[in-house]
Image: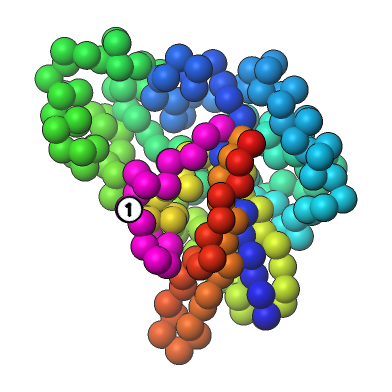
Amino acid sequence: MSVKVYLLRHGRTRGNEEHRYVGRTDEPLTKQARESLRAKGAAAEGIVRPDVLYVSPLLRCRETAGILFPGQEQIVVDALRECDFGEFEDMNYVELNGRPDYQRFLDSGGECGFPGGETKREFQDRCVGGFLGVIAPELERQSDRQLFFVVHGGTIMAILDRFSDPHRDYYDWQTGNGSGYAAEVSWDKGTGRLTLEHIAEINE
């Protein structure tokens, strides 16, 4: 049995171009991002096809998945949505610079969480729970499958920080829009331990 997962970040949005904290804001892809993804999808046609395609409920992920894999059924997993950035939502560094709560956030390395939003731990636990919820039945099935996840940069970082082997920390897994990682799932049924191994970058 071999289960392979592909963790892909959605295409670029206005907020990404302006370096904003875009979490719950449900904005679409830019025109340029759609064109880039169409070219990428055409190049991969007939080479890679998901057995199952999981997506965040937010528009930017559903749009990306629809362009890359037209006609493929999308299974929405609410727990895989981006972090709730609270009061920092849709703001960037220039707008936040000088705020004491933003400085505290920076000084803590992001650990203190977003005022009015999620902490890093809350966000990671949510993403990991959603990921395990769809992976566990696949492992019980004991079949060879390719599972694609079109989600957010933060979601990918949360999952790989928890399951990567060899381990790398949360911020080491940052990836660009339209890019991501492929990995093989290893599962010890006796201990219930799941790891993601042989991780390779997927570049736009």
Magenta highlight on residue 164: yes
**Three-letter code, disc 1:** Asp
Left or right of residue 112, residue 50 in this image: right
Q: Nearer the viewer, residue 23 or 78?
A: 23
Left or right of residue 118, residue 135 in this image: right
Residue farthest toward the right in the current orientation of the protein: 46
Query: Residue 74 in the image: x percent, y percent?
Result: 72, 46
Magenta highlight on residue 121: no
Rendered image coloring scheme: rainbow
- Residue that appears at 42% across and 19% down: 19
The C terminus: image quadrant: top right
Label 1 sits on residue: 169
Query: Residue 88 in the image: x percent, y percent?
Result: 31, 22
Left or right of residue 196, residue 91 in this image: left
Examine the rendering and report whether any part of residue 8 can be seen.
no
- Residue that appears at 37% across and 47% down: 172
Left or right of residue 163, residue 29 in this image: right
Q: Is mark 1 on a helix, strand or loop?
A: loop
Crowd band around label 1 with a 10 angstrom C-alpha radius: few (<14), some (14–19), many (20+): few
User: Magenta residues: mostly which secondary structure?
Assistant: loop
- Residue that appears at 64% across and 18% down: 30
- The answer to whether residue 117 is above or below residue 90 is below
Q: Nearer the viewer, residue 119 or 200?
A: 200
Examine the image and state in which quarter residue 174 appears.
top left
Q: Give the range drawn in magenta.
A: 162-177
Residue farthest toward the top in the current orientation of the protein: 95
The N terminus: image quadrant: bottom right
- Residue that appears at 44% across and 56% down: 160
- The answer to whether residue 177 is above or below residue 160 is above
Count of marks overlaid on the render: 1
Query: Residue 37 in the image: x percent, y percent?
Result: 72, 31
